[in-house]
Image: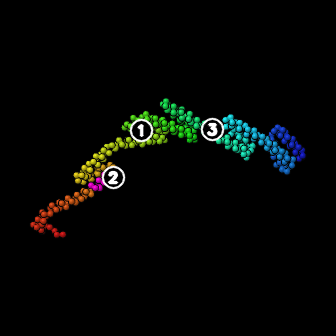
Amino acid sequence: MDNEAFFQQFKRNIEVLLSQGKLEEAFEKCQLALQKFPNEKSLLKIKRDIETQITYKNEKEIKTNIKTAKTLFGQGEIEQALRLTKDTFSLAPSNEKLKGLYRKFQEAYKEKLEETEENFIKKQYESLKNLIDEGDYPQFIQATDRLESENQANKNIQKLLKDVRTILIEKEIKNRKDLLNSEKFEDIENFIQGLEKIDANSETIRQLKNYVKRRKMGSQIEDVEEFIYTGESNLNTLMKLGKYEEAILVCEEILQTNPENSAVVAIFRKAKRKAFYKSRAEAIKNILAKLPALKAEYKQNKENFIRI
């Protein structure tokens, strides 16, 4: 087949495709032919004609889609309007009107999602709160576990779960107030372990554990505190009576138990100082008391004394 015959056949094929409205397919065939005959004027003209028709068709489709999208949006079908607008971008990626509509629909869709999620969270909160009020804890735990597994990346849902679990924990604590104020520390620890199954990272449980720990420690050191209190009272009495050695011994006992007791440390230092001066004074007094006898013995037995 010579070139002329080829071009005539090619034109007829293109005309058939155009009559069927297959503009894109006709355009692709024209592109392929131009790869073989890049300078063929008749092919270039056909290509331009097809491009014109495609442009006209796209513009018409864009107008129709914009009108349809606006209608959908007005009917509250925001997601469909957004999807249609997005699909239309392939026809005119730089169309400013399409871009403006897309931004508008996107913002409205975002607000709709937020409202839908807010209503969903409110409904879930009410449902879970009812389960707590009814004491249906197995159903509550099952519902919260399901919500958590299905919405691991949703911060709002995770906050909802934290809130309702805290409500349940606080209710349980309130109901077991008598136990928590008792000295049944083993039972209390078992109770707390049960609470941790609801929410192991609960701040409320952490504070409760600290409270119980302080109470338990307070019970264990009650005798020690009594000893320290009695010891301090005895110290003041001993110091007033001038019994500094005894005061030193009491101070040492107390400081073994409570080395940070600043009041006892101060008395300890004072007692040691007083004991030293008292001991020195007594030693001098004893020497002075024995001095006359020593002088008399010296006169009688000088040979028994060594002169220094």
Q: Nearer the viewer, mark 1 or mark 3?
A: 3
> Looking at the magenta stretch, what is its main secondary structure?
helix
- Magenta stretch contains residue 108: no
State left or right for residue 131 relative to residue 100. left
- Please state the horizontal and vertical placement of residue 234, each as a whole percent of the image: 26, 48
From the image, tell me which residue sits under label 2.
262
Q: Give the distance between the C-alpha atoms of the residues marked 1 and 2, in whole angstroms.
A: 35 Å
Callout 3 environment at 10 Å: few (<14), some (14 to 19), or many (20+)?
some
- Please state the horizontal and vertical placement of residue 112, each as a whole percent of the image: 63, 38
Quadrant housing the C terminus:
bottom left
Q: Give the distance between the C-alpha atoms of the residues marked 1 and 3, in whole angstroms.
A: 47 Å
Q: Secondary structure at mark 1?
A: helix
167 or 250: nearer the viewer: 167
Which residue is found at the position 54% from the left and 32% from the top? 127
Q: Secondary structure at mark 2?
A: helix
Q: Nearer the viewer, mark 1 or mark 2?
A: 2
Residues drawn in magenta: 260-271
Q: Give the distance between the C-alpha atoms of the residues marked 3 and 2, in whole angstroms.
A: 66 Å
Callout 2 environment at 10 Å: few (<14), some (14 to 19), or many (20+)?
few
15 or 211: nearer the viewer: 211
Which kind of residue does numbered mark 3 sit on? Lys
From the image, tell me which residue sits under label 1.
189
Q: Earlier in the sequence, mark 1 or mark 3?
A: 3
Q: In the drawing, what numbered circle is on residue 112?
A: 3
- Please state the horizontal and vertical placement of residue 7, each as a whole percent of the image: 87, 45
Q: Secondary structure at mark 3?
A: helix
Which kind of residue does numbered mark 1 sit on? Glu
Q: Determine whether label 1 and label 2 are within 8 Å by CB.
A: no
